[in-house]
Amino acid sequence: MEKQQKQVCDIRASKGMTVAQSNEHLRVGQNNAYIKTISGTMDPTRTALNFEIGKGGVVKEVDMKKSIPRRIRENLQARGIKDPNIGLAADDPRRKRTVVNIILQGSRERMRELAFGDQQVNYEHGADNSQVTRNAAIEQWAVDMYNFMAKKYGEQNIAAFVVHLDETNPHIHCTLLPITDKNRFSYNHYFGGSKEAGRKKFLELHNELAEVNKKYGLARGESIARTGAQHKS
């Protein structure tokens, strides 16, 4: 019996984003400390295959010149919204969850097929895959994921939407600002203020994602909600 391929949605809330985390997402400075923590799963010969989705669902190269924290600042300034954590110490209990990092992916076999088709890719650490090209199917999947997130949470709230093809399992990092129509930060508004409310929101999100992902052979799988979790491939 053929193994069912499943979608995965991993939600991680935080009270901001550091430049180090941004560097990992954008692959800035391959020798920085944050990059080294995932060096065992990252293939630098496939890094050029990474891409991001911009406004309007446009596929483009990863913009490594503008960090995600800077993108967030410019986003807020353009909308006249103040970051509620400005001026507060890192350990101040008044700090709000202003960034939600949503990782979208699926079963490894299917994600690799979407990304590379039937090309031969060596996933051993240190292998040279510089001959591998990006498959159009992964771009279409990413655009569909972007359009879904934009419709559900507001395109103006997407600070970055980066697709990594240089790790063990191809995946998306969606950096989301939980800002309501009234221009206020509210994680609870989108993801629930209690365990039960959060569970209901995550279930709803996962069911809706499944309707989009079935086009790509990915069935409903697991949804994971974390706060302050570290990057995992």
Image: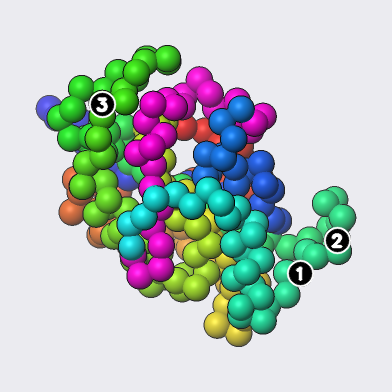
Tell me the element at label 3.
loop
Tell me the element at label 1.
loop
Tell me the element at label 2.
loop
Does residue 225 sit above or below 170 in this rendering?
Answer: below
Residue on which disc 1 sits: 84
Residue that protrudes farthest toward the left in the picture: 1
Residue on which disc 3 sits: 131
Does residue 2 sit above or below 147 in this rendering?
Answer: above
Q: Quadrant of residue 143?
A: bottom left
| Spot occupied by residue 83 in the image (x, y as percentages of width and height) | 73, 69
Does residue 42 sit above or below 197 in this rendering?
Answer: above
Q: Nearer the viewer, residue 136 or 30?
A: 30
Hey, what amino acid is under mark 1? Pro
Q: Nearer the viewer, residue 219 or 139?
A: 139
Residue range of the region highlighted in magenta in the rendering? 32-57
Hey, what amino acid is under mark 3? Gln
In the image, taking residue 19 as reference, residue 43 lies left or right, namely left
Q: Residue at x 78, y 64 (%)?
A: 85
Hey, what amino acid is under mark 2? Leu
Residue 103 falls within the magenta-colored stretch: no
| Spot occupied by residue 225 in the image (x, y as percentages of width and height) | 54, 49
Q: Earlier in the sequence, mark 2 or mark 3?
A: 2
Residue that protrudes farthest toward the front in the picture: 65
Q: Residue at x 50, y 64 (%)?
A: 158
| Spot occupied by residue 130 in the image (x, y as percentages of width and height) | 31, 25
The numbered mark at residue 174 is: none
Disc 2 vs disc 3: which is toward the camera?
A: 3
For the residues bearing labels 2 and 1, Cβ distance under 8 angstroms: yes
Assess disc 2: are there few (<14), some (14-19) or many (≥20) residues with their C-alpha within 10 Å of its C-alpha: few
Marks 2 and 1, how far apart at CA: 8 Å
Residue on which disc 2 sits: 88
